[in-house]
Image (tube, rainbow, N blue to C red):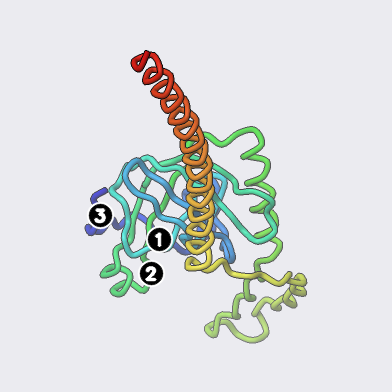
Amino acid sequence: MNLATHTHRTHDPRPAGPKSRRRHPRISARGVAGHLQSRDASMPGLPVENISMGGLFVRTSAALDMGTPVMLQVVRPGLKRAIQVTGRVVSSVSCDEARTRGLTPGMGIGFDAVDGDAADRLRALIEVLTAASPPPPPQPVSPTLPAATAAPVPPAAPALPQPTVHVVDASFLQLAEARGELEEREARIAKMEEEMKDLRRELLRRNRTIGELALRLSRYESV
């Protein structure tokens, strides 16, 4: 896979504001990670910056080429199993652009049609993340307005109690994947050793049979 180093300037990884043209508003996805798989590359444990029913943005310094089809497994502590979706790369922010514009390097993934169980579980995850997000700060009163005509600032709504969120560390996810591959390899080795034992037993049996036949042949020849 040729990893893209060019800059695509159509994506801002920050959550969409009121004037955003996105069909689905994106929210912060703290603690969510994505295992990304394309035809030629595997990128496990990418932190998800924001997410919606239509797509997500993952943090990475090596974005894939625009239009690359991908398969994603979205994971978060508390999920019994990953949410699997498919999509393609629709935007990217290079490291240089991120430093210049104060953005987050990574790439945007637009989902293909999400329906059935995957849609229900994705919607439930977004509801949990929305509830865990802190309320926006109150807007300050414009200093140009007289104090008598300034609209009163309503008190900020009390923050919802936030559950403890454990951020998925990429190295931990990679270690878990490597451990699974090691266990699978050990199981294959154990199976091969059993097959070798069976072959040795079969070889010994056939050697005994050959020895018996050779002995009988020698007796016939000596008559």
**Where residue 7 sits in the image (x, y, percent)?**
25, 59
**Where residue 127 sits in the image (x, y, percent)?**
69, 54
From the viewer's side, name the closer residue of 175 and 48: 175
Label 1 crowd bin: few (<14), some (14–19), many (20+), radius 10 Å: some
Q: What's the residue type where badge 3 is placed? A: Ala
Q: Secondary structure at mark 1?
A: loop
- Tell me if I can see residue 19 in this picture: no
Q: Which residue is disc 1 drawn over?
A: 12
Q: Residue at x 58, y 66 (%)?
A: 30
Q: Secondary structure at mark 3?
A: loop
Q: Secondary structure at mark 2?
A: loop
- Does residue 59 appear left or right of residue 78 in this picture? left
Q: Which residue is disc 3 drawn over?
A: 4
Marks 2,1: beta carbons within 8 A:
yes
**Where residue 72 sits in the image (x, y, percent)?**
49, 46
Q: Residue at x 43, y 31 (%)?
A: 207
From the viewer's side, name the closer residue of 92 and 179: 179
The numbered disc on residue 103 is 2
Q: What's the residue type where badge 2 is placed? A: Leu
Q: Residue furthest front?
A: 223
What is the distance, in whole Å, between disc 2 and disc 1 at their CAs?
7 Å
Q: What's the residue type where badge 1 is placed? A: Asp
From the viewer's side, name the closer residue of 34 and 154: 34
Marks 3,2: beta carbons within 8 A:
no
